[in-house]
């Protein structure tokens, strides 16, 4: 198995956007992702606890849902023109995350969680923040200031 590093996302190197409110929510998410990653690493080393993994995964999903709902509300309230596209990415990410959680409940496949976190979610998060969120934050900062 490929070596996966901790933290999953270095909080000091995560991409930032123009709107501090969004950066703060991303920092919270990164903290939850890193806690989840730490649980996975413990499990890969034979010190894992399935209940702790499930709890960390559920906490991350709950935060992600709130994160996306908050962003969606802001975009809608400020009449962000590409709102449907950005919301669509949020919806797809939540569907994937929920599938991963259900698969974990059904199979307890640790390698599937590790693969999702590092090979699917991590590049998605980086790209999403650097593209969708960057454009959205710039728009929201301008419209919320006026």
Image (cartoon, rainbow, N blue to C red):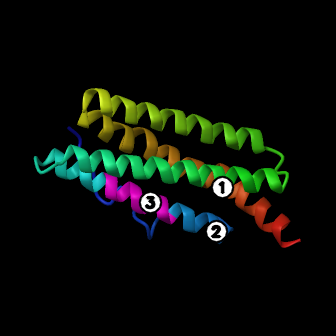
Magenta span has 28?
Answer: yes
Numbered range of the magenta stretch: 27-36
Q: Nearer the viewer, residue 41 or 135?
A: 41
Q: Which residue is mark 1?
A: 70
Residue 104 on image: x %, y %: 31, 33
Residue 142 on image: x %, y %: 82, 67
Q: CA distance from mark 2 to mark 1?
A: 10 Å
Mark 2 or 1 closer to N-term? 2
> Helix or strand or loop: what does disc 3 sit on?
helix
Q: Nearer the viewer, residue 55 or 18?
A: 55
Q: Which residue is mark 3?
A: 30
Give the foreground label among 1 and 3: 1
Q: Nearer the viewer, residue 93 or 134?
A: 93
Q: Is residue 144 left or right of residue 46?
A: right
Q: Is residue 16 visible?
A: no
Give the foreground label among 2 and 1: 1
Determine the residue positioned at 47% across, 58% down. Answer: 29
Magenta span has 92?
Answer: no
Q: Are marks 2 and 1 in contact (CB under 8 Å)?
A: no
């Amino acid at each position: 198995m490929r070596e996966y590093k901790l933290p999953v996302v270095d909080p000091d190197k995560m991409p930032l956007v123009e709107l501090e409110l969004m950066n703060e929510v991303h920092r919270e998410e990164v903290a939850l992702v890193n806690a989840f990653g730490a649980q996975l690493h413990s499990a890969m080393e034979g010190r894992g606890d399935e209940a702790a993994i499930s709890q960390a995964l559920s906490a991350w999903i709950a935060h992600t849902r709130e994160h996306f709902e908050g962003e969606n509300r802001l975009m809608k309230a400020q009449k962000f023109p590409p709102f449907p596209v950005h919301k669509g990415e949020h919806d797809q990410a939540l569907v994937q995350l929920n599938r991963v959680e259900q698969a974990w409940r059904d199979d307890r496949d640790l390698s599937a969680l590790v693969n999702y976190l590092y090979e699917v979610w991590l590049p998605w998060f980086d790209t999403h923040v650097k593209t969708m969120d960057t454009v959205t934050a710039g728009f929201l900062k301008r419209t919320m200031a006026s």
